[in-house]
Image: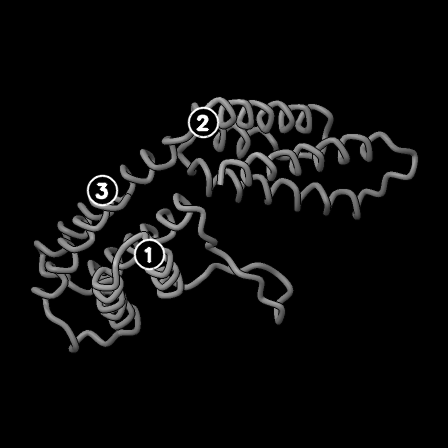
Amino acid sequence: MKEKILKKLDTLIGEANTLFRRLNADDFEDAVDGAKFSGFQTGVLSFFKVILGEENLYYKRFYNGVKYYTDYNLNLALELLSKVKTDIDEGWLDDLKGLVSAELFSDFLDMAEHLLEGGYKDPAAVIIGSVLEENLRQLSLKNGLPIEQNDHKIGRMKPLRAEALNTELAKHHIYNLLNQKSVTAWLDLRNKAAHGLYDEYDLTFVKNFLQFVRDFAAKFI
């Protein structure tokens, strides 16, 4: 996974250099090259969000600083990409996203617990389910498993569904078949909450769901 991340960073640095050359080229085209810059900007932010998280300083600096197709913005983009690459190559960022994610997971689960204390089982179930899905995504990334697949119908990558991530994690022995079946059952509860099937579960079920996700995160994330 580290090699893949470094390779992706090299690709993004190459894109930035190409955009820099195009900006000062005689045949520069505002619309075409501007669209390429926009795609580059979105791609870097998406990549930083996955590997670092939105709370990371590199993500925030890029988000706030690289907004326009100018020499200064491209130089800043190259500087940030190079620094991230160096930090990852030297091992400084290996555990950072996991720490950020753990804090976010805890905040959301505390929110769900507060809702449960007020008897609001349905929004709590949706929140807990979202945390479980993100746990599956982070666990997949941690173990070098894909979290996206190419959808030929729409011509781009799209996220794998939570159950697909669950299947792959069990298939690669990240956890056992019993864990897989438990995740499947709890994802079913999340789906019922998300689709308004509120009579098919009660408050106790959602409290147990909360405890399961806390235990799952503590064990695997």
Instruction: Name the secondary structure under disc 2.
Output: helix
Q: Which mark is residue 106?
A: 3
Q: Mark 1 vs mark 2: which is more N-terminal?
A: 2
Q: Mark 2 vs mark 3: which is more N-terminal?
A: 2
Where is 176 relative to 28, above or below? below
Where is 188 relative to 168, above or below? below
Percent position of residue 172, x then y: 37, 56
Q: CA distance from mark 1 to mark 2?
A: 25 Å
Percent position of residue 125, x then y: 21, 61
Residue type at mark 1: give it: Glu
Q: Which mark is residue 57?
A: 2
Q: Which mark is residue 167?
A: none
Q: Which mark is residue 133?
A: 1
Percent position of residue 163, x then y: 35, 65
Instruction: Name the secondary structure under disc 1.
Output: helix
* Quadrant of the image occupied by residue 43: top right
